[in-house]
Image (cartoon, rainbow, N blue to C red):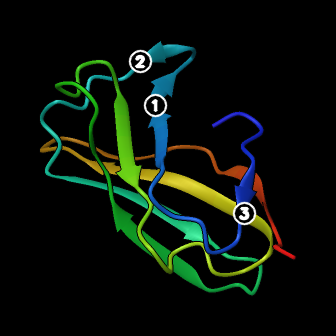
Amino acid sequence: MANPEVQVDGFGWNIDLRMVEQGSPIDISTATLCDYVSKKPDGTRMTVTAVFVTDGSDGKLRHLVAQGEIDVVGTWQIQTHVVTPTQDLWSRALVFEVKGNL
């Protein structure tokens, strides 16, 4: 998610993120939980389900943004949370801006 152009109230587009460690993908194919946790500019948190883009061995996850999820203008943070039978993994938080509409 590099410098995305995000508009408030937009939906129907994917957020694709990848779990990596020291630049290499983490195999999350055995995950029992895959979430994206976002912190909105007003401080509220939102958790949504993410799914594998392929089989999870490449660490790639995706969430299709639903109507009403991107509802606040300003600086957002997003973090991936994955639980496997042997690990509880959190990515570093990424920052993105949500722009207002006319």
The quadrant in which residue 79 appears is bottom right
Q: Where is residue 29 in the image (x, y as percent from the top left)?
A: 16, 30
Residue at 56% across, 67% down: 38
Which of label 1 and label 3 is nearer to you? 3
Q: Distance between the residues labelled 1 and 3?
A: 23 Å
| Res. 54 image quadrant | top left
Amino acid tagged 2: Pro
Q: Residue 7 carries which label?
A: 3
Q: In this view, does 77 lie to the left or right of 97?
A: left
Q: Is residue 68 left or right of 84 when viewed as pictured?
A: right
Residue at horizontal 62%, vertical 86%? 44
Would you name the residue on which mark 2 appears?
A: 25
Classify 38 as above or below 102. above
Relative image position of residue 73 (x, y in whole percent): 79, 76
Q: Nearer the viewer, mark 1 or mark 2?
A: 1
Circle 2: element type: strand
Q: In the rendered structure, find residue 18 and report the number of the disc placed on it.
A: 1
Q: Distance between the residues labelled 2 and 3?
A: 29 Å
Crowdedness of circle 1 by 10 Å Cα count: few (<14), some, many (20+)?
some
Where does the image place residue 36, in percent across and percent down from the top left?
A: 44, 58
Q: Residue 43 carries which label?
A: none
> How much space separates mark 1 and mark 2, taking CA atoms?
7 Å
Give the vertical position of 19 relative to 81 (above or below): above
Query: Which type of secondary structure does the marked residue at label 1 adopt?
Result: strand
Q: Looking at the image, which is closer to me, 5 or 25?
A: 5
Amino acid type, mark 3: Gln
* Cβ–Cβ under 8 Å for marks 1 and 2: yes
Along the line of sight, the residue nearer the viewer: 5 or 55: 5
